[in-house]
Image: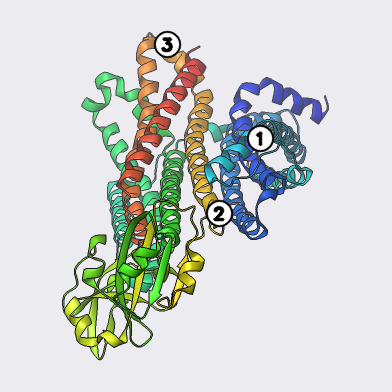
Amino acid sequence: MSLFKLAWQNFTQHAKRYGALVLSLSFTVFVYFNFENLQYSETLAGLSPDNLDKVKMLLDIVKVVLVCFMVSFIWYASNVFLKSQKKEIGIYVFLGLTTSRIGLLYAIENTLVGLVSIGLGVAVGSLFSYLFAMIFVQVSQLGVAVEFSLSGRAVFETAFLFFLIYGLLTGKGVWDIQRSSVRELMSASRQYEKIEGGRRFLLAKALVGCVTLGIGYAFAIKNGGWDVLANAMIATVCVILGTYWLFGGFLPLVLQTLQKNKRFLYARRRVLWINDLVFRMKQNYRSYAMVCILLICAVTALGCGFTLNNRIDAMRQYSMQYDYQILSTQGDQKAHFDSLLANVEESSAIPVAQYDEKLFIPYSSVAGFQITKPGPDECVHLSKGMILSLYTDPANESTTLNGKNLTCVEDVRRAVVGFMQDKMEVPIYVIDDTVFDENFPSGERLYLYNYKLKNQDVDYAETLQDDPATTGLYIADKAETSYLWLNTMFTLCVFLFLVFLVAACSILFIKQYNDSFEDVEAYAILQKIGIDKTVLKRSIAKECSLQFGMDFVIMSLSSLFSLTALSNVAGDPMEVVFFVSNAIILVFIVLCDLLCIRFVQQNVLS
């Protein structure tokens, strides 16, 4: 029998086991292909050149993230299935095949898996490309017509990238097989993976993990001033390492302690699933850590999406807060401007003064915007429209006025004085009325008259521009599209949330489902010696649920701090995002857990 026929026979005979691998690899191809096809298709051609360039730039950034995801996901899935194949490969050695021919057989078999995966992923991606593009355009509110189109370049680049990654990992597998002895190959799938080290070592590792996580949480919520990016990097590294060490120390310590407690172990048949978890502990805790980190990334991505959506709406509000904003040197012209405009919904007059390339406003003129009232030695900074802030401490915006230090007590990140707040190159501060009057006499002030109209169809631009009391005039542009590309950021973050969530649950599902093939004989023996099938089903359910549940608990705690850090940077509350994201993840995890339990039970008990 030729190697190709043998590889094809193995592939068809193990179709049930390979199914999970093919589906997981096809999922990565499906996701990446749809983003590639969206970028190169004609769907986005209706955008303006500026918006089109920026949307494509965002898609490139997302593709880089997806490539990193593909590498890690394919690497994990390939390693899991390579381990299950080693026993069969070891048998081939006894049959007389050399390691070079076994490596070639493995490469052919993996190539078949790759071809089916890329074909299925591109085919399903092509079928859903129109739906994907339609959802992307509708959620992003891009206002362009969606057409069904497939890009040959997208197919080529997706296939090339997938086979490049998959080929390198297949080559690594061939090299691993050639370096393994027959004994290692035969026992690879049934190696006892108890974590080495005594209770003190595991306890120390768990404590180090907890301390590292605590340091990461502290840096995540720290008001770091201009060091906020460094704090975020430190927090990210600490959370990843802390999560890994926590699962690698605390989990083995608890399970091995429970394993030694015979009273607990033998009650309610816990011996079955506790021992099974301990048996594969090395592989288990690494998988748990990876899944937990992916879920944290998913929550953070969704939080970024909602934050960006809120910030984009707030940025638009700066320019759309008022229909007309009139700048005048005269402070008694409000009644005059009122007479020129009809159907006024909202109006105000705000004194403005300049000192040392800074603008100052009295508190009484903007008190209705729920701004902290500054004291005689305090001020409030009115921020420009921004997506994220590089600092989180209001004290960084403290300033001076005529040699007097003013401590900033609040950094307002919403529209208060419209275009002036967003478009002026100089900072704007709200100060106490008495301080304002003492430093700026009437002759040194300008006055900003703001108007929001009920009927926006009437054009008053010419009337206001020709008026002698008008020094400057700003008119809101209702057809403004320069912010259109920012809408895609929210959509991309939501897609990344779903990708990370599906990937995390898929990793746990693949691992448990693949492990179940190794447990078929053990469960058959347990049934033969008289253990009831219901007891075995409950044991499988507890083992699966524990693995999903542990990741959810650790993820919830870590995501609370990651969203708190994001709230500090963006200036928006994250409580709703925390509960919504955790609720979505919980529902998804429960569904995947139930599905995993059903498949594993059918596999080992049928």
Q: Earlier in the sequence, mark 1 or mark 2?
A: 1
Q: Earlier in the sequence, mark 3 or mark 2?
A: 2
Disc on res. 144 = none
**Residue behind mark 3:** 527
- Per the image, label 3 sits on a secondary structure element best described as helix
Residue drawn at (74%, 22%) of the image: 9
- Per the image, label 1 sits on a secondary structure element best described as helix
Compared across the picture, whether 567 is left or right of 523 comes to: left
Crowd rating for badge 3 (residues with CA inside 10 Å; few <14, some 14–19, many 20+) = some
Q: As drawn, which residue projects farthest toward the right?
A: 2
- What type is the residue that disc 3 sits on? Gln
Q: Earlier in the sequence, mark 3 or mark 1?
A: 1
Disc on res. 484 = 2
- What type is the residue that disc 2 sits on? Leu
Of the two numbered discs 1 and 2 in the rendering, the one whose residue sits closer to the viewer: 2
587 to 324, vertically: above or below: above
How far apart are the two marked residues, 3 and 1, measured between alpha carbons? 50 Å
**Residue behind mark 1:** 130
Residue 145 percent location from the top left of the image: 66, 41
Foreground of the two, 197 or 323: 323
Foreground of the two, 383 or 345: 345
Specify the quadrant of the image occupied by residue 550: top left
Crowd rating for badge 2 (residues with CA inside 10 Å; few <14, some 14–19, many 20+) = many
Residue 56 percent location from the top left of the image: 64, 55
